Image (cartoon, helix red, strand yellow):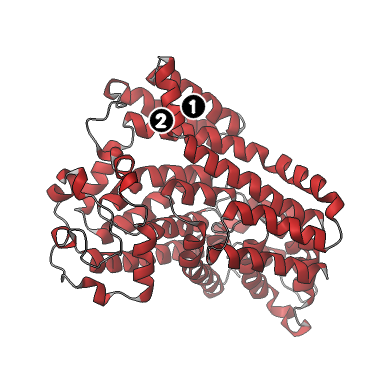
Amino acid sequence: MLTILGFAMIATFLVLIMTKKMSPIAALVLIPALFCVAVGQGAKLGDYVIDGVGNLAPTAAMLMFAIVYFGVMIDVGLFDPIVRGILRFCKADPMRIVVGTAVLAAIVSLDGDGSTTFMITVSAMYPLYKRLKMSLVVMTGVAATANGVMNTLPWGGPTARAATALKLDASEIFIPMIPALAVGLLAVFLLSYVLGLRERKRLGMLTLDEALVREPEQETVLAGAGTGAVGGDRLRKGSAASGSADLTQDGDEEGKDGDEEGKDGDEEEFKGLDPNRSTLRPKLYWFNAGLTVALLTAMIMELMPIPVLFLLGAALALTVNFPHMPDQRARIAAHADNVLNVSGMVFAAAVFTGVLTGTGMVENMADWVVGAVPDAMGPHMAIVTGLLSLPLTYFMSNDGFYFGVVPVLAEAGAAHGVSPLEIARASLAGQALHMSSPLVPAVYVLVGMAKVEFGDHTRFTVKWAVLTSLVVLGAGILFGTI
């Protein structure tokens, strides 16, 4: 019964947010609360929620101060040269910008932290997407998928968990998987190229000067992507005025999802490229750059807990860049919306994970899935593990999968002569999809900063992330590491 209710709870949550019948925060809180009562454990709901909140509190604290820190860095102009450099390199070509998003996300993912990756990527790329009327779900989808592949780095988490759970050396798991993961990353770049071509077909191309000097009042957000409304003809170079006729249904949705915020947000959206905004601190540029590099270095070297590092970094950045109290309060207030949105989502997710774990649903779901594997598949347990990693890492945390499910799969495989190393490597295949799971706090940073509905991101990204995961699994089989 717990198995059925567990799957039903997850399915209900996904349907409600993807159809936009409920907001993610409301669904993350109310759906598990109702199912907790349904399984007869309503009296323990408070304990489950407190446990979940306790587990995610450090993550929420880290995100709060990290958003303030990177928000201040955007305000003072740290990322302006990056944005302008990318724009010059991309020549205002949507295809190059989408590929640039994938490359940037992959490079920044080397720090091993998804939240930081998304904050830096969105900070740099968001003004470009808004200025060129590009689809924001394309940005979030490409960034999440690229980060998912790179999340398999030994210091990223999954590889270390697999090594710990199966008592293996992390290097023995990761190094043989490098060719397969490289193919997966190439698949992400190819995907970004294809999506970029679709964006180029939808929007056409601007010249560099047009992209940089258009007046704010011309930046009116399109009501429907590619329809030629609101000065659409002025935005296009070499594309037909009736470009919307060439769009696929997905293209229409993506454009609409990316451009539906409206006029009121335009001044906020384009300030990243405004060379005259009052918050710029050009004389402190190298201080801010050095502080950011030092912060990321300390995080990679694990000198202090990440929440403490970002707390100190945010306090120092505010004090140095805005020494007057009214200015500091103004900067904090300017980013309060993002802080509340993301941290609120994390605490709401704590209710979901707390109920899922506390009621025993996760454990029963995992046992059912493992038990459903036919005995005849025993010799192919590594491939089975790779395939199961897609849904299981999406519907449960990495801790639950690697410490609860993978050891059972490894034991089943060992009975048929399958090496635990093969099981461990195969278990990494689903990480491209995992990074868009509603149970991953970092994804709320991504959609929150990009001002994208979580349901829209999920509907767009899941199919591409599944494809990328299957490419990694297939490449691992082809290279003989799985």
Vertical order, 395 against 110 (above or below): below
Which residue appears at 24% of the width and 69% of the height?
A: 201
Question: Foreground: 174 or 28?
Answer: 28
Q: Residues within 10 Å of mark 1 (few under 14, many from 20)?
A: many
Q: Circle 1 sits on which residue?
A: 314
Q: Which kind of residue does numbered mark 1 sit on?
A: Ala
Which residue appears at 22% of the width and 33% of the height?
A: 275
Res. 385 image quadrant: bottom right
Which residue is situated farthest in the top direction here?
Answer: 324
Asked if residue 93 shows in the view, the reply is yes
Marker disc for residue 72: 2
Which residue appears at 81% of the width and 63% of the height?
A: 38
Q: Earlier in the sequence, mark 1 or mark 2?
A: 2
Q: Residue 402: x percent and y percent?
A: 70, 58
Question: Foreground: 366 or 234?
Answer: 234
Question: Foreground: 209 or 287?
Answer: 209
Q: Secondary structure at mark 1?
A: helix
Asked if residue 189 shows in the view, the reply is no
